[in-house]
């Protein structure tokens, strides 16, 4: 009986948490394409954001960007995108969230992926086939992962 009650409480908590999530199609941008509101209704975790940022299987942000504080434990930082040292001093949280959600709104022609976009793609393929994928596609990162990456980036100040 205790297990059923515990499972019910966890289920209700998960449902309440997901109720605050903003779906990719419902993201609200300000006039400069920043995203003022959290996608989850809660602050992100900078430690988890660092993991998403540096993980080749998740955000893989280090494939294009470098961050000095990671040089000791994360190999092969990219140089295609700008260094993100001091990024929290250059942009506010809404602007950083807007860039991570869909950088193409701000930087036309960028090769940075839209991490929280599910439709409007040009020629995405279905896996490793020549068949076009059906939209909507899943976002690259979840709303929680976006918030975690934003929280991590907000810790990167000039020394």
Image (cartoon, helix red, strand yellow):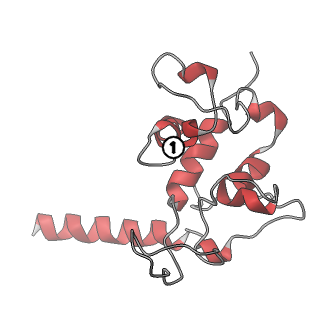
Whole-percent x, y for residue 126 in the image: 43, 75
Compared with residue 111, is residue 45 higher up or lower down, i.e. above or below? Answer: above
Query: Which quarter of the rendering shows the N terminus?
Result: bottom left
Residue at the right extreme of this rendering: 31
Whole-percent x, y for residue 129 in the image: 40, 74
Compared with residue 19, is residue 52 higher up or lower down, i.e. above or below? Answer: above
Whole-percent x, y for residue 140 in the image: 51, 60
Residue at the bottom extreme of this rendering: 134
Which residue sits at x=69%, y=53%? 111
Mark 1 sits on what residue? Answer: 60
Q: Is residue 2 left or right of residue 67?
A: left
User: How would you rate the neighbour count of disc 1 (Cα within 10 Å): few for under 14, some for 14-19, many for 20 or more?
Assistant: some
Relative to the observer, which residue lies in front, 145 or 105? 105
Q: Say what secondary structure mark 1 lies in.
A: loop
Q: Is residue 146 left or right of residue 154?
A: left
Whole-percent x, y for residue 79 in the image: 66, 32
Which residue sits at x=55%, y=38%? 63
Residue at the front extreme of this rendering: 130
Which residue sits at x=51%, y=56%? 144
Q: Is residue 24 left or right of residue 1?
A: right
């Amino acid at each position: 009986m205790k297990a059923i009650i515990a499972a019910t409480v966890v289920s209700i908590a998960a449902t309440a948490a997901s109720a605050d999530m903003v779906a990719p199609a419902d993201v609200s941008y300000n006039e400069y394409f920043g995203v003022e509101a959290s996608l989850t209704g809660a602050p992100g975790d900078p430690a988890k954001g660092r993991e998403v940022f540096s993980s080749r299987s998740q955000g893989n942000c280090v494939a294009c960007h470098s961050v000095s504080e990671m040089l000791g434990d994360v190999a092969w930082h990219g140089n295609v995108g700008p260094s993100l040292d001091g990024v929290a001093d250059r942009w506010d949280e809404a602007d950083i969230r807007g860039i991570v959600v869909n950088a193409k709104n701000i930087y036309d022609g960028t090769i940075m992926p839209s991490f929280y976009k599910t439709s409007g793609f040009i020629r995405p393929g279905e896996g490793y086939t020549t068949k076009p994928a059906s939209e909507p596609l899943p976002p690259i990162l979840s709303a929680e992962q976006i918030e975690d990456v934003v929280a991590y980036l907000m810790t990167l100040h000039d020394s």
